[in-house]
Image (spheres, coloured by chain):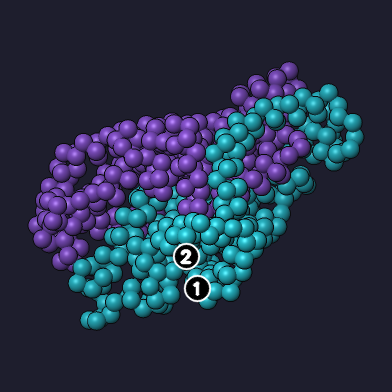
Amino acid sequence: MTDARGRKAWWAVTDIVILAYALVPVLWIASLSLKPTHLINDGRFVPSEFTWSNYHQLFKLDLFTSALRNSIGIALIATALSVVIGTLAAYAIARLSFPGKKLLVGVSLLVLMFPQMSLVSPLFEIERSVGLFDTWPGLILPYIAFSLPLAVYTLSAFFREIPWELEKAARMDGATPFQAFHNVIVPLAAPSVFTTTILVFIFCWNDFLLAVSLTSTEASQTATVAIANFTGVSQFDEPTGSIAAAALLLTIPIILFVLFFQRRIVAGLTAGAVKG
Amino acid sequence: MTMTTESDLRAPASARGHPRAPLSQGARSEHRLAALLCAPAALVILVVTAYPIGYAIYLSLQRFDLRFPEQSSFVGLANYGSVLTSGHWWQALTTTLIITVVSVAIEFVIGLALALAMYRTLIGRGLIRTVVLIPYSIITVVAAFSWQFAWTPGKGYLAALLPQGVAPLTDHTSAIGVIILAEVWKTTPFMALLLLVGLALVPDELLRAAQIDGAGPWKRLTKIILPMMKPAILVALLFRTLDAFRIFDNIYILTNGSNGTASVSMLGYDNLFKVFNLGIGSAISVLIVIVVSIFAFVFIKLFGVVAPGAEDDERRLR
């Protein structure tokens, strides 16, 4: 009993350290977002005066609300497609033997390594000539392409560690390759798929370079770009406070997304504590 | 369908090990399935990136300066020569290497600790798992901006803790330190999340058995947990290294490259978007890819068979 309580106390301390690590810098951003403009440079961690004006201001901007809508729609669609497409390919890479496997892995790593800044100008030219510039698909396609290497590589690395004898058993019982994939592997693969989903979503949500190069109006401009175009509460103010407020608002969808998926990260495995 | 060994239960049903043998019915249907499963991914990647990557490589072999477009011509590897003989490149490369190695090393240690806590904590597990990811979910530019504020004397709470007159962002060494701090804070959650999945793959029975055999926590970590987490560690280190080496936003906001803190990506950016020398800028991009590929190659060799695409299946621990 005392041992259990001791362990709980130890974990409570650890948790507090972790919370402080993750949240103190965030609280500083919150503090910047709540300070009135004339106090923004006062260097105090806890604001001496609070104001919500930065937040009110945000929702008065049509561009910001449309940008939020674009961000949510584009990131969700791109994430869903990328994870589905990536899961299929990762399954093949981890499980099947076929010519060109190394080439596929190599090319996707190359895409990941290539500095995006030297790719955005040609992408812009292509999208303008085929009419994809400043549209949702015009951003969704590159997001899928640039997140697929991460999705495919991560998923195939983890898929290789799954106990495959279960799949073989299913095949022996007469399941087709697809049934074996769907009924046996998908549940086992769920933790890595959900983790990848979170990472891909954050990648799409936080992208700035592609969005700023491939969008121009409220038809498809995302929130990260909208933030960069902020001016202050009045046009003579520094936009620091509104930028901080917008950045905090933008983390809320990710927090919801992670809250929704985090339980599944280690689902299916007994979360039993090993003594130590 | 040919099985190479009967005992290797986990070996995929494949003709692995007999590349020249005539394809059996099973192998052929396996190729067809693989092609079908990989086609969407390969197609999207090719459609979006083939032309831009090809074009960047083409530009790197051209004299191509937007200020003097009429002087464009094929110059072979001359752009690479100019970059590699420039002191700026080597200074930026050194800075970038230091930032990459130090950040990734620190991130691995903290990330592993965070992953263990996220996996095992008895209190508020869901809360901890969610909160840990918050730094990663804040837009890099804004996070960098808040650090810049925090460390600027007169504006920030962290600068206020320092002695009067100390401005960490204006000195080479301390500025690099602040850049690393910002990078580590922001991206350790990425590492932690991948390592968490790796931890979840370690069977609890194995750890319990080891404990009964008298293995202490340290021994269990180094002899069981870490070896079994190899795939997760490979992915986490590889992706973080590739990413850290291309560090841009953090430095751009924190120091704008002053006092020798510019990274190779900033050098490329300045050439592409500030002086519009697309030839040199593209050559820098290709050189970044080459350096990063060396990192990737070393990691994949070090971790050998756990790397996706490696053909050997004799890597099982059990």
Residue B88 numbered mark, or none: 1
Q: Give the residue type at disc 1.
A: His
Relative to B34, does residue B120 appear above or below in the rendering? below
At label 2, the amino acid type is: Leu
Q: Residue sitting at 26 percent across and 65 percent down?
A: B149
The answer to whether the residue labelled 1 contacts the one labelled 2, judged by CB atoms less than 8 Å apart, is yes
Q: Residue at x 9, y 57 (%)?
A: A49
The residue where tag 2 is placed is B267
Can see residue B73?
yes
Image position, residue B60 (x, y; %): 58, 57
Say if B306 sits above or below A97 in the image.
Answer: below
Give the residue displayed 73% in from the left and 39% down from the top.
A100
Query: The chain coloured cyan carries which letter?
Result: B
The kind of secondary structure element at disc 1 is helix
The numbered disc on residue A46 is none
Residue A266, position as x, y percentages in the image: 50, 40
Which residue is situated farthest in the top direction here?
A174
Please state which of residues B15 and A243 is positioned toward the viewer in this rendering.
A243
Q: Count the labels in the image.
A: 2
Residue A7 picture quarter: bottom left
Q: Earlier in the sequence, mark 1 or mark 2?
A: 1
Q: In which quarter of the view is residue A92 placed? A: top right
B310 horizontally vs A249: left or right: right
Q: Which chain is purple?
A: A
